[in-house]
Amino acid sequence: MPLSKNLINTNIRVKKQKQTPSTFVWVNEDEIQSDLNQKINNLKLDLINQEETLIAYEYNRKRAIYEYLVRLNKNSSKMAASKASAKIVYIDPAENKGTTIIGWANYWLEHNCLPESQQGKHKKIKSLSDNEDFIKKCHEWIHSQNGITCPSKFKKFVEDTFLKDLDKKTICISTVSQWLRKLGYNYRQIKK
């Protein structure tokens, strides 16, 4: 009986052991460090050059990333560096601001740009302009007009084609203008 207990325990131990990888990739720490230093310097130059043109929200995010990377480069832990950068950049940072800064920095290091804000991306109400068939028919109609239309003509097309089936009588010009922008068309005034 004790023999079978020992066999079971050894089997469990064998299964729990981590397997070593068969191949190792040589990583040059100096190259990684110089690449990180280069990215930090580029971010610093961006902050200096774009200080007047960036909106405050974007500037604060870039500054928080910069402060975080500088502290991380000085061998601080990730959380300590992110919390310190949050305290420097923001007046009264929330508890999770450090974690948010780490996410921004990871995105910045990978893509060299800020992550797109998700604010306002979660609609509660579906719009007609989100429908693929609607978008396709609108593009076809605009192309049949030689790519030139005005909001009032487009409004008439939408009302005659789509809204009569929905028992809706009309939509306003500002909504039509938003839909045209969403479809990728820009307003240009052509003077004669």
Image: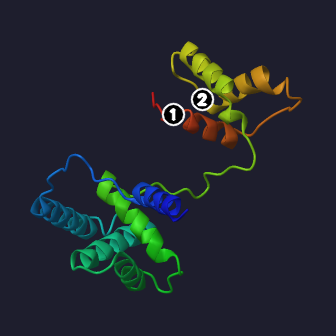
| Residue 147: % across, % down | 51, 20
Residue at figure coordinates x 69%, y 41% from the top left: 175
Closer to the camera in the image, 168 or 5: 5
Drawn side of residue 96 relative to residue 138, left or right? left
Q: Quadrant of the C terminus?
A: top left
Residue at figure coordinates x 74%, y 50% from the top left: 124
Q: Residues within 10 Å of mark 1 (few under 14, many from 20)?
A: few
Where is residue 128, by image quadrant?
top right
Q: Which residue in the rendered view is the most extreme toward the right? A: 167
Label 1 or label 2, whichever comes before in sequence order: 2
Closer to the camera in the image, 125 or 75: 75
Q: Which mark is residue 51?
A: none
Closer to the camera in the image, 99 or 52: 99
Quickly name the residue at label 2: 150
Can you say whether 131 is above or below 121 in the image?
above
Quickly name the residue at label 1: 184
Drawn side of residue 5 relative to residue 71, left or right? right
Residue at figure coordinates x 52%, y 76% from the top left: 96
Residue at figure coordinates x 20%, y 66% from the top left: 45
Where is residue 156, by image quadrant?
top right
Q: Which residue in the rendered view is the most extreme toward the top? A: 144
User: Label 1 is placed on what type of residue?
Assistant: Gly
Q: How many marks?
A: 2
